[in-house]
Image: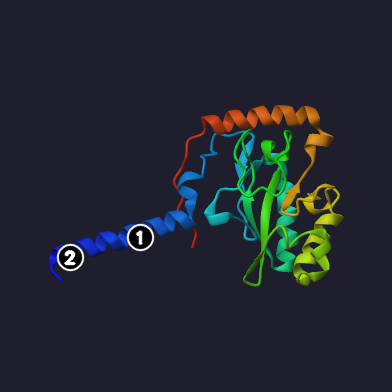
Amino acid sequence: MGKKGYRVLAVLLFSVAAVWYVYFHNQFYTHLNTGKMETLVAFKSEHIKGFRGQQILVHKGFEEALSRLEAYAAAQHVTLVVNQSYRKQGQKVDRAVVNPASRSNHLVGYAIDVNIRYNGKKYFSEDLRRSNLDQLPAAISDFIDAVRTDKSIRWGGDFRKQDPVHFDVPINHTQPKNWTAYAERCRMEVDSAPYVWEIWNW
């Protein structure tokens, strides 16, 4: 193979690697600069991770509840893989388990949707339904039991219309006026925030 052939091969390999990286670690277009935000913050922890490196964007008031979720997950050696945290009004929700509520706690950064990873396997909405709890690994059912005993965090599996991938603090019910104010502040911050480049944490 001549020099030209090696150059073509190198470009091809680089292109494949770049596409692979962006597909599996799409932080290039999901991370906002939160440095000047007063309401929202990027949450990072060992047992709560964004799907494919996505940013976990939440209200600062939700951080304390997420820290407790982190502790419950760590105690059982499970990882919560976050598919969605804060979302803007009208944002499309891929593979939604239930129709998004008009006053969802996602709109104020007080909710996350997750899959649960344990022992190399991911557990999805159908796996996590109430009727399946006794069939799940003890680590996962014990994690959910810990959440259910927490007085401020809700598990969506207990909703009348089950949403077992959902965890939130229900300020849409307990603090409706704050919910309205937070929704507007969050929207304004996200609309004005620039995107930032993130390096994948190997």
Q: Position of residue 58 (x, y in %)?
A: 65, 42
Disc 1 or 2, which lies upstream in sequence?
A: 2
Q: Position of residue 23 (x, y in %)?
A: 46, 55
Q: Amino acid at mark 2?
A: Gly
Relative placement, left or right, of 1 versus 28 is: left
- CB contact under 8 Å: marks 1 and 2: no
- 154 above or below 180? below
Circle 2: element type: helix
Relative placement, left or right, of 170 versus 95 is: right
Task: Identify the residue shown where x is 24% and y is 64%.
Answer: 9
In space, the residues marked 1 and 2 are separated at their CA atoms by 17 Å
Residue sitting nearer the eye, 124 or 29: 124
- 156 above or below 107? below
Q: Position of residue 184 (x, y in %)?
A: 66, 27
Q: Which residue is mark 1?
A: 16
Q: On the image, which quarter does residue 141 sit in? A: bottom right
Q: Which residue is mark 2?
A: 5
Q: Please identify the quadrant where the N terminus is shown.
A: bottom left
Circle 1: element type: helix
